Image: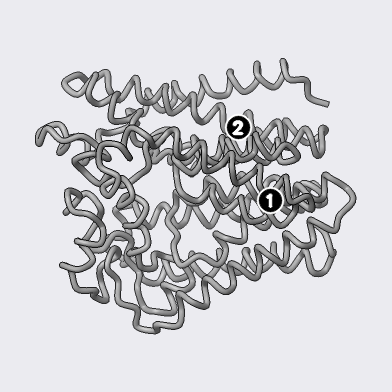
Amino acid sequence: MCSLRRFIGLEFSVFMIIILTLIFLGFYPQTSFEDVFLQKANLLPFIDFRSGYPPVTRLPYYFLFIAFSNSSIYGFITLFFNALTFFLMIFTIYLNVAKLSYERTLSIALIVTLMPSVIYFTLVIAHGDAIAMMFSLLALYFFEKPWLAGVFCGFGTLAKFYPAVLLLPLIIYYKDFKKKLALLYAFILTMLLISLPFLLSDPLMYISVAACNFLRGPSESIFALIDGYFGHTGFLHPTFDGSLYSWQFAALYEPTYYDHFRYKWNIPILPYMSLGLQLASIVGISLLARKKKDQKESVSLISLATFSYFAFSTFYNPLVQIPQICLLAIATINWNKHRQIKTLAAFEAVNTLHSLIWYCPLFLYVGVMLPLSIAIMLRFILYIFVLTSIIRRNSV
């Protein structure tokens, strides 16, 4: 058993050790090129410039940079801000796990906390995934209260866009039409209220932030591997040409085989296959969750349905490990404890390999194609293992 007080005390101690270790090693968050560009060009995000991420994620780092742009304290302050978002994400994992399997709360929370890739990509190279997952997990925790779930999905979507995927499993799960309506109404209202200042200033620029993501090509997924594309950002990223609306950019720039943000598929059917597999897995697993009488099993299945969105996505990079591992920890909570831990560890091992390919200088000399292909294939095998387990067991 794990009391809330004991959990907070232990997690706080672990976080302080992690933070002090990062400080000792000199690992601090760095300012982004976008923030430097916006300051020098005297542009405002979402008004004069199409930023790469939504406001709930983007603005905290932008304001921290504006406040500490000429001081080395920026990295120190941002490290502690990232640590706070990391702690809150782990706390929401604790809430969900405690609701489903109270005796596993401490072990699962500690396992996620101590994963090297999660630490690095949440504390040092943070893109707001911890913030997005905190709201997503709160929506999952309050899934029987559609108003609250809708509000948290709205906040999460304005941190990173993928929390909106949680809406589909919840809509399918709810049998009462009023609950479906309440979920969507709360979600849309939250999105509009938070977005109102930007919509009033320049609605087209603000809408372009989301629309630009539809121009993305594949990235380090099984579909990218099949299509022959191994890069991440290619030659284009939203920072470039960010003062244009997304449809203006799409009209001006011809698609190519090597640009991530205007990618021309070698096998045009692949993105449609990806979308079809995503919808089939999300809908199928959500319908199974709807049939379950045990609420614990339903929560696990809803988490698994959201996880399947990533499993069949055309896009992957090491940061995607953060939402996946959080959802997987909840989706596999009814598995044998050792089987669950081994599965989580396997995902972390593959992501660690993937991360090393990105950042270890060794791969600049030995090449990235073969190790990256191996990492992609191993991860896809793990996806299939997790998703087929539900068929064999008829539950997670």
Q: Which mark is residue 170?
A: 1
User: What residue type is disc 2 on?
Assistant: Ile
Pick the residue in front: 203 or 374. 203
**Spot occupied by residue 50 in the image (x, y as percentages of width and height):** 25, 46
Q: Is residue 54 left or right of residue 391?
A: left
User: What residue type is disc 1 on?
Assistant: Leu
Q: Is residue 149 left or right of residue 20?
A: right
Image vertical order of residue 304 relative to residue 93, above or below: below
Q: Which residue is mark 2?
A: 90
Pick the residue in front: 171 or 257. 171
Pick the residue in front: 360 or 224. 224
Category of crowding for the residue at label 2, using alpha-carbon neighbours closer than 10 angstroms: few (below 14), some (14–19), many (at least 20) = many
- Quarter of the image with the N terminus is top right
| Disc 1, SS | helix
**Spot occupied by residue 163 in the image (x, y as percentages of width and height):** 54, 47
Q: Residue at x 76, y 65 (%)?
A: 389
Q: Quadrant of residue 249?
A: bottom left
Q: CA distance from mark 2 to mark 1?
A: 22 Å
Q: Earlier in the sequence, mark 2 or mark 1?
A: 2
The colour style of the image is: one colour
- Quarter of the image with the C terminus is bottom right
Q: Is residue 111 visible?
A: no
Q: Residue at x 89, y 51 (%)?
A: 293
**Spot occupied by residue 205 in the image (x, y as percentages of width and height):** 26, 47
